[in-house]
Amino acid sequence: MPLLLAIESSCDETAASVCRDGKILSNIIASQKVHEAYGGVVPELASRAHMQHIVPVVDQALQVAGVTAKELDAIAFTQAPGLIGALFVGAQFARSMALALNIPLIAVHHMQAHVMANLIETPAPEFPFLCLTVSGGHTQIVLCHSPQHLEVIGETIDDAAGEAFDKTAKIIGLPYPGGPLIDKYGRSGNPRRFRFPEPQIPGLDFSFSGLKTAILYFIQENTKNDPGFVESNLADICASVQERIVSILMNKLKKASLETGIREVCLAGGVSANSALRNTLSETGKQMGWNTYYPAPEYCTDNAAMIALTAYYKYLAQQFSPLDTVPTARANW
Ligand code: KG4
Ligand code: ZN
């Protein structure tokens, strides 16, 4: 019955979670509002905010779980990928705790953890399954053979799906991060009102940079003679952009299922909180005969519960890391 504490600090959320024997007992997140004024995450400010938040966040995670640090069997942290200064804060905190408590350290890959978020709640997908991982920095189709063996079989060649949402939001004047706002306004819009192009990329890879450019030209063209165009068509623009991003993602996911013969299909990452993507996955799943899954919204965006669950499987496999393990901004699987 291992009792684990996990820390996540790869971007702009400082998060800690305690899990016992694979059951999440607490999931605490401090989001950083400081970046809103800049239209994106400012790395230096992120590191400073992690320094401010990490002690109270870890304290609260232990308190909510009803445990003390002395009871812990291991400490896990996000090793990569992410903003290097942000990763250092979580890594150094975890290394120090592991040293002080004389317990093992577990280094976790952030993208593996996003996928593993699907195993936090039941029903969970059965291995082997396919996972569409869509976040602010990544867009991947992952073939999951086992908790320890995940294989990326498709990924973006330029922007991530989250960037497509956030950059569109910026073009139409919505604050950062715009993904959740496009979702919100798009709910009351007509997704077929405006047609944006679908890129023709071979295989299972994605591209979103052409879509971003098409949206930019579309908005420039339409606001030339009508400065109020965006305001008066906001819901339809959001719904139409969302429709196209979702169709690009879903077409590749269908292709991956047909090629691999796998019908256990799930979503992961911040963009998997998107209501249109979740609904489309369920509908597509019915047509294709898939069993479909997505994590609860709090486990889609960055959180430490997914780090804790991944660490639980690593603990079972005795995959520990030396105390001098360093984070890296980029990382292969
Ligand atoms: O996984 P995540 O929290 O952080 C990264 O590891 O990148 O993903 C953040 C991304 C942002 O681009 C954000 O706009 C997007 O997820 N996002 C959404 C929604 N909620 C978060 N995009 C569309 N609809 C949403 N409801
Ligand atoms: Zn993430």
Image (cartoon, grey):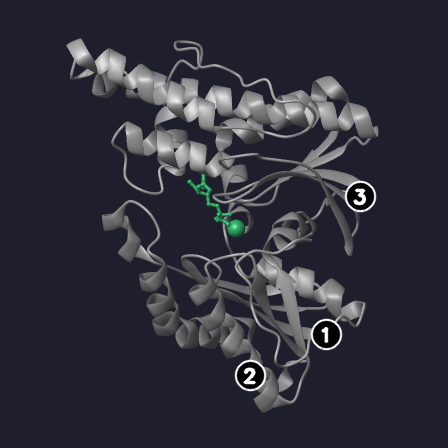
**Foreground pick, 207 / 73:** 207
Whether residue 85 sits left or right of residue 157 in the image: it is left
Which mark, by number, is residue 99?
none
Q: Residue at x 27, y 34 (%)?
A: 174
Of badges 3 and 2, nearer the viewer stands: 2
Residue occupying the point 55% across, 61% down: 304
Examine the rendered structure and indicate whether residue 129 appears above or below residue 285: below
Please tell me whether residue 139 is drawn above or below residue 243 in the rendered image: below
Q: Front-most of 210 and 45? A: 210
Residue 57: image quadrant is bottom left
Whether ligand 2 has any atom under 8 Å from the Cβ at mark 1 is answered as no
Residue pointed to by mark 1:
320
> Counting other residues with Cα less than 10 Å from the Cα at mark 3, is it few (<14), some (14-19), or many (20 or more)?
some
Name the residue that disc number 3 marks.
126
Res 268 quadrant in image: top right
Q: Between 211 and 195, which is closer to the camera in this rendering?
A: 211
Secondary structure at numbered mark 1? loop
Whether label 3 touches label 2, CB < 8 Å: no
Rendering coords of residue 279 (x, y %): 56, 26
